[in-house]
Amino acid sequence: MIKTIYFLFFICAFSLGLWACTGKQTEKFKNLSSDQFEDFIQSGNIQLVDVRTVAEYSEEHIPGSINLNVLDNDFGAHIDEVLQKDIPVAVYCRSGRRSRNAANILVKKGFKVYNLDKGILDWKELGKDTEK
């Protein structure tokens, strides 16, 4: 009898945990693979933003991108000066971590955002176009 009660308790707790996790969407932007990101930036009117440092951007970047360093204290102000809210924003960084942070900031400011999931490292590994 005790084993049955423990088993039922475990099942209920496990089910509740699964239910709690499924409804949450912490990210309000869309992560794209390198192939999806390439198709997206070639498909039309977007703002392509590299959120790495100026030095990283100078070494190599995706053609057509602009550089807005997410680590800059004035990142939020630069967004408002440079980007248009009615045009989707595609962001990327080295590995995807900084661009996720930037995407969250952009979403809070009212932008529709698409993130290169594994960053320019994956982009280059797949042999996609870059420029210096």
Image (tube, rainbow, N blue to C red):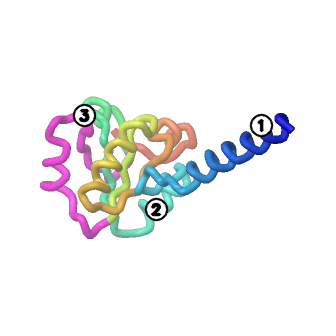
In the image, residue 9 lies at what x, y percent? 72, 42
Where 57 falls versus 34 (above or below)?
A: above
Residue sitting at the far front = 1
Q: Nearer the viewer, residue 58 or 19?
A: 19
Residue annotated with mark 2? 40
Mostly what secondary structure, the magenta segment? loop
Residue that sits furthest to the top in the current view: 55
Image quadrant in which the N terminus is located: top right
Regarding mark 3 in the picture, which secondary structure is present there?
loop
Where is mark 1, residue-wise? 6
- Front label number (2 vs 1): 1
Decide whether residue 103 is among the magenta residues.
Answer: no
Q: Amino acid at mark 2?
A: Phe
* Residue 22 place in picture, x, y as percent: 58, 53
Amino acid type, residue under disc 1 in the picture: Tyr
Residues rendered magenta in the picture:
62-87
Q: Which label's residue is closer to the chain start, 3 or 2?
A: 2
Query: What residue sits 33% from the left and 58% below the top?
Result: 89
Left or right: where 82 falls relative to 6: left
Residue at the disc numbered 3: 71
For the C terminus, the image quarter is top left
